[in-house]
Amino acid sequence: MIRSSRMEEPLEPADDALVKRTKDGDVEAFDTLVVRYSPRLYGLVYNMTSNHEDTNDLLQDVFAKAFRAINGFRQQAQFYTWIHSIAINMTINFLKKRNRRRGISLDDVDSHIENDPDFIEMTSSSDPLRETNLAELQKKLNESLQKLSHDHRAVVTMFDIQGMPHSNIAKILGISEGTVRSRLFYAHRQLQSYLEEFRKP
Amino acid sequence: MPEKTDIQKLLRLKRYEKPPEGYFDDFLIEFQRRQRTELLRVPLHEILWDRATSWLDSVRVPSMAYAAILILGAGATGVIWTGLESPAGSGAVAVAAPLPAPAITFSQDPNLPPSYVLETRPVSYESPFSF
């Protein structure tokens, strides 16, 4: 086990090491990667689909595909980028085929949101938007996100919700950083127009 | 019109949408279960082939043995193939027609060793000019 020199705390094995062990037949190493990446990828897929059940099925398929393909992963890219690329491509393909009438199935909002400065600021003003019921706001925001194109929704999810830097998003999607910024600009503009109606009293 | 920053703040709050507690623990268990199920769906011949190759790896068969097995296998396949290629009955073509059994006369006394008298003259006794 690798230990940090400063705190003498056991360090988690690096992705590269886990990938190598998986290639050598250590299935538990891949389980560690699943545990490490499932929360991040859940957020990505969930915010793309706005449906918990679809997210669960897709995420299982993403890891199954990654496990089958890991021997072909040459480690020229980071595992982080590779697994995110698989997830985003599978999700976009899924959304293209999904029945449009499929409803939204949202997760509960964590109670920690009440301590978030942005939440406090947005719910303590007299602005109509800020007085809105949180559940209603959540629903409206998700509906607005669903109106965006898949490509625009992907960049909004990764940048605004997951807080990824432009460079990482560009690598995952295989596009330039300029294209990422451009897509974000148009996506924000569209979201503003969708939420405009919601602001009217 | 809401400011762009408001949109971004709202989007950021979506991070608080979380799956039920314990979901990710169950997720791994479900993943492992699906992997096992997928393994069971592998065709039988693939499983047998994998087992055979792994068994051969474990017994450390000398490399020449593979060549011998290959030659034997090729030979057996050739024999079987030849049999399949020749229709039933036509195999007799390759077999020499049975010659008439030479007439043998035994001596009268059963206690004496048998003496064979050929009714035909050996070819070697033929004159080279007799044909």
Image: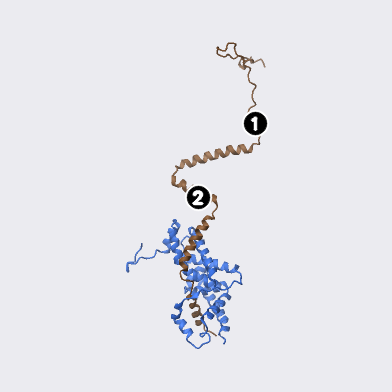
Q: Which residue is mark 2?
A: B50
Q: How many marks?
A: 2
Q: Which residue is mark 1?
A: B92
Q: Which chain is blue?
A: A
Please, what is the three-letter code of the amino acid marked with disc 2? Answer: Asp
Protein image colouring: by chain
Name the residue at 47% across, 48% down.
Answer: B54
Please, what is the three-letter code of the amino acid marked with disc 1? Answer: Ala
Q: Which chain is brown?
A: B
Q: Position of residue B50 (x, y in %)?
A: 50, 50
* Parent chain of label 1: B
Examine the rendering and report whether any part of residue A45 can be seen. Answer: yes
Figure check: A182 above or below A19: below
Q: Between residue A163 and residue A121, name the one nearer to us.
A: A121
* First of labels 1, 2 by sequence position: 2
Please state, as top left, top right, bottom left or bottom right, where the C terminus of chain B lies in the image: top right
Q: Position of residue B79 (x, y in %)?
A: 58, 37
Whole-Å distance between the Cαs marked 1 and 2? 43 Å
Q: How would you rate the neighbour count of disc 2 (Cα within 10 Å): few for under 14, some for 14-19, many for 20 or more?
A: few
Q: Between residue A125 and residue A191, name the one nearer to us.
A: A125
* Parent chain of label 2: B
Please state, as top left, top right, bottom left or bottom right, where the N terminus of chain B lies in the image: bottom right
Examine the rendering and report whether any part of residue A77 can be seen. Answer: no
Q: How would you rate the neighbour count of disc 1 (Cα within 10 Å): few for under 14, some for 14-19, many for 20 or more?
A: few
SS assignment at label 2: helix
